[in-house]
Structures are given as structure tokens and as C-alpha cells.
Amino acid sequence: MKFGSVDHPEDIDFTLPKDHKDTLKILGEKQAKPTNIYVGCAKWNKADLKGFYPRGTKDELEYYSKQFNSIELNATFYRIFPPEQFSKWYDKTPDNFRFFPKLSQEISHWKRLNEESKPVVDKYLYSAINLKEKLGCLFLQMHSNFAPKDFDRVVEFAENWPKEIPLAVEFRHTDWYNDKAVAEDLYQLLEENNIANIIVDTAGRRDLMHMRLTNKRAFVRYVGANHKSDYSRLEDWVKRIKHWKDNGIEEIDFFVHQNIEKESPLLSAYFIKQLNAELNMDLKIPNEEHQTKLL
């Protein structure tokens, strides 16, 4: 992911902001049941994840899904796959695996949530539901020039979204979060419709670190800078996730990107090791023997 990349990451203050004052109100009290934590990459193809697959790997998804418990499925942004393709992905993956598909750019970037996007949403969902229980949470990523002047479109989209299908949204125009009045209206809308508010952690857009959860799902898109600070940043995220877990969060969906994607599995392995140690989890460390050699 090139979004928010910078030439000199060593000049960036990567300190995680404090939680928004209303985040703990959303989480509530500590829950008895365990928190579900999903960690994955954005893609599974060999061209991007160079060095991750053992020589002779015949099916990349089949191997990937035995190393990770989830995938941020960006391929579905570029075209709407037929139902049969989603069924094939379902059949290739273990029972505990989850897909987090991005909604089509036709919905978010071309039609920009207008009336004409409704049949496209229906077509997309008709296919995506073939993931059945392996459908983790769909997510909508709006163009960076999609501004609050079109808030009415967001309202209609959120209120008409089928409530039985989990959804998370990502806004990139700075005014969604830096205009306080707009931000509060947005948070209220997402809360009322049980939609997660995506947090993007990338070097060049620290303004998107709103740290405002709108339901008990934290959906984080982490973008490393191919710099040594990537590891300390992940350590800070482990501490924040522990805090959320201690205060009742139900699910963490954390997806690791890199400007050079081949390092994503390495960062993910490090992150999962830290989660296991700090949160007393037992998440599988992807390709552990190979990653240990790389570390």
C-alpha cells in the first residue's frame, strides 16, 4: 500500500494517540468470553509476498490460509467476482479462516454511494455471501476526495446496509475527522448502525489516527514504512490492543501492509509473537520456521 508513504519515515512521530474520549464508553465492561483476533496481509499472491511460499507451493491461498487466520481481500475492489469464485475460496480454506473483502471501487470511487450504486451493492453481496461463516467483515474505503459535503449519501448507505452483514468504513478526506462537528455526526451514525470505524496507521497521514471505535470491533489497517520503526510501532499496537481487550472489545481485525509488500509476512509474524506473549494468546505464527531464520 503506497497510501501515506513518505521518503523519510525517521522524521515522523509514530506515537499512538490517546483513545478518543468515547471509545471506552463503546467498549463497556470486561467481557467473560475471549476476544477474537484476526491478523493477516492484504494479498496472498506470490508476486507480492516474495519469499513467503516454500518452493513448489501449488496453491497459494491454500498455503496462506494454513499460516494466517485471515486475509484483507483487496482483489474484490477491482472487480466483482462471481459467486462461484467466492465458493472456491471458501472450499480451499480451513474452518477458522476469515475473509475481509473490500467493496468494489464501482461503489466507492465511481458511483460514490449515489443511487446508482445500490444495484452494484446487491450484486456484490450476492457473490460475497458465498463465503458464508468465513465472511469476517466487509469494508468500504472511500476516495480521498470524497468529502463531508456528501454526508447525506453516507447516511443513506449506512441506514440501508443489511444489518446482518458486518461492515467497516474508511474515510480519507481530512475533514471527516478534523472537523469536530462532522466527526461527531459521523461517529453517531456509525454507532447507530453498528458499523466499525477503520483506523489507518500510515506515516504520511497521522490525521487519520482518530482512535474512535464505534462498536466492539477494531478494524486496523497498518502500513509499515520499510523502516526499523515498523517493529516498535507494532509493539505499541500490542499494548493498545491489550488495553482494549481488558475493557471488553469483542474483535480485533488487524491487517499489515508494507510499501514493499514482501515484508508483510515478516512483520505479521513479529506482531503475532508479541500478541501471544502479551495477551496470553495462542495464535499461529505464520511460516514460523522460515520467519525465525529471517528474524
Image (cartoon, grey):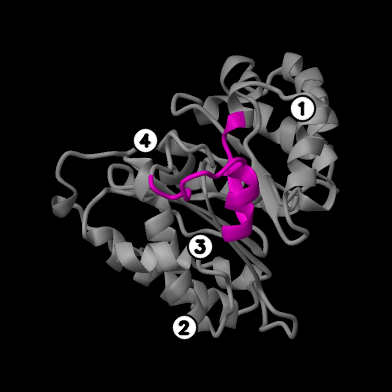
Would you say residue 84 is visible in this rendering?
yes
Q: Crowding at label 2, few (<14), some or many (≥20) Cα neighbours within 10 Å?
A: some
- State whether residue 58 is above or below residue 82: below
Query: Which amino acid lies under the numbered mark 3 shown in the image of this protein?
Result: Pro
Task: Work out whether residue 156 or residue 203 is closer to the camera in this orientation and state it.
Answer: 203
Labels 4 and 1: the sequence-earlier one: 4
Q: CA distance from mark 2 to mark 4?
A: 30 Å
Q: Secondary structure at mark 2?
A: helix
Circle 2 residue: 278
Query: Which amino acid lies under the numbered mark 1 shown in the image of this protein?
Result: Tyr
Residue range of the region highlighted in magenta in the rendering: 51-75
- Quadrant placement of the N terminus: top left
Q: CA distance from mark 2 to mark 1?
A: 38 Å
Labels 1 and 3: the sequence-earlier one: 1
Quadrant assignment, res 252: bottom right
Task: Work out whether residue 41 or residue 284 is closer to the camera in this orientation and state it.
Answer: 284
Q: Crowding at label 1, few (<14), some or many (≥20) Cα neighbours within 10 Å?
A: many
Quadrant assignment, res 213: bottom right
Labels 4 and 3: the sequence-earlier one: 4
Quadrant assignment, res 161: top right
Query: Which amino acid lies under the numbered mark 2 shown in the image of this protein?
Result: Glu
Circle 3 residue: 286
Q: Are marks 2 and 1 in contact (CB under 8 Å)?
A: no
For residue 212: magenta?
A: no
Q: Secondary structure at mark 3?
A: loop
Circle 1 residue: 124
